Amino acid sequence: MSRKTLIWLFLAPTLIGLGLFTFLPIVASVLLAFFRWDIITPPEFVGFDNFAEVVTDPTIRVSFLNTIGFVVVAVTLQLAVALALAVLVNAKLPNLIKSFFRSVLFFPLILSAASVSIIMSYLFNENFGVVNQLLNLVGVGNVPWLTSTHGAMVVVVLVYVWQNFGFSFLLFLGGLASIPNEVYEAGQVDGASSWQQFWKITLPLVSPTTLVASVMAIISALQIFDQPYVLTRGGPGDSTRTAVMVIYESAFKQLEFGKASAIGIILTIVIMLVTAVQFRLSRRYVFYG
Amino acid sequence: MKKIATYVILILAAFATLAPVVWTVFASLRPPTESLSTDGSVIPSSLDFTSYSAVFEKVDMWLLILNSVLVTALIAIGQMISAALGGYVFARFEFKGKNMIFALILATMMVPMQVTIVPVFMLIRGMNLADTLLALILPAIPTAFGTFLMRQYFLGLPKEIGEASEIDGASPWRTFSSIYAPLAMPGMAIVGILAFNFHWNEFFRPLILTISEHNFTLPLGLVSLQGNMGSGSVATVLAGVVISMIPAFLVFVFGQRTLREGLTAGSHR
């Protein structure tokens, strides 16, 4: 086999596969977004109508707002918890204890979001859930977690963060490990407290990791689907309906494939914008030592 | 004092992380009548496997397990092979259009799967694969991230051994198959374990691409089991959840290092 044959033969699975199942679908999706099509009747060109519905259709608009709110709260919480725990695990602990906590804290990442959501739907059940039983012990009455609009979103955020903070935690551990010990020693000589060391040394020096971790956390949070689908199916009302859930429902419940594509494209553009904005901001805030 | 605070916080965090999983295991081992017990006891008074036999009666668990194993294994093997082949070419050869092709492959990582799912669904229908396991397997085999990872891996292997083997008259295929492919096994393990972790747990694609219950994978089967049952059989559903966690748990115990490397590999770009 010649070099040239080998090159193209080796690339064939990836190129044909990505061409067929990624590139072609992207192009199709962009075209489809300008049509109204239910598979049964022929597609009808509607210009930007599908995009306009994102603003005019109350359900879609609410879902986008929910998604944005969810991303802001969940990602902030996820990064804060992850960084705090990474700093603590990175402190001078015996190696065995360090690796124990590292393993335990990233454990939820290996579970399926669907299974986790099933478990949590029982734990947060209003009448027999463990969470309310514990709250009863301290004198709080049963909270309607999954059946009230605010409660449901709180549970979605908690369940998502519980399962995903481990990923940011691993990234932060990697970032913290690369900060040389001498910097802290110098800080100690100058009499900096742990608190000051965190704000003046750790936070600036870990900022490249913070950037990567936040981009990755935002991108995956924007695509949230499994948790609200299993926990609440988007309810009560539309209170936990998310952008991806509306893509799913428009396409596979209402057979509005053009509308689903338009929402998908808007979501993609949002993801690309977020990435671009964050890398611009990073020039000002990230310290590359 | 500071040390004590560190330990207290870490132990609380570890507790919050493990408690829901431990509760699940315990609840699945209670007698079904006690699964909703409100007496506050956490540890079951006696081990009872009724819920485990019940879940096999309520749904075809064996079929769900078989489907999940087949789908996950074939995707993992397919990804390992296609990523190794593609990554090798990008790491070791120069050819026209190489950089552009590589950039295009990387660009596909920016597009979320939910955006392409509608055309993929139609394509699968057009290929007469709707509602089959192949509908889940085929589109998941090409992997941009895996190809990128394997390229990095091959770049890390010394060029000289390949050059020496070619001077000795080995064909490009032989150089790959008997020298580089065996050396790249640790890299392929990362690709395989990441594929396992993602596809064993995935819910969105099976929800859309399969229709009949006999094509469901575990996560979808369990969610539909939960939906079909009233609140009375919590323990049965939880028994199913525990069964579905066992393989993931084994990978966590035996492949944790590889998994951690893979998960964080994307951030070192």
Image (tube, coloured by chain):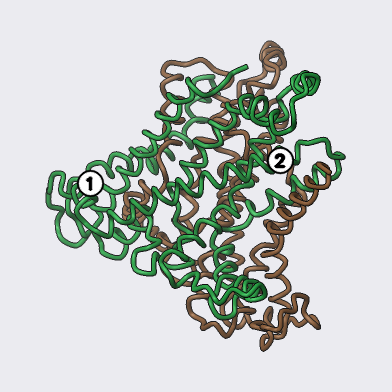
Chain colours: A green, B brown
Measured as percent of width and height from the top left, residue B80 is found at 60, 40
Measured as percent of width and height from the top left, residue B158 is found at 70, 17
* Disc number for residue A85: none
Q: Quadrant of residue B166?
A: top right
Which image quarter is the C terminus of chain B in? top right
Q: Would you place residue B66 above or below residue A28 in this image?
A: below
Amino acid tagged 1: Ala
Measured as percent of width and height from the top left, residue A105 is found at 70, 49
Q: Quadrant of residue A134?
A: bottom right
Q: Nearer the viewer, residue A246 or B220?
A: A246
| Disc 1 chain ID | A
Q: Which residue is mark 2?
A: B258
Q: Which residue is mark 1?
A: A33
Disc 1 is placed on an element classified as loop
Q: Would you place residue A121 above or below residue B55 in this image?
A: above
Measured as percent of width and height from the top left, residue B60 is found at 57, 76
Amino acid tagged 2: Thr
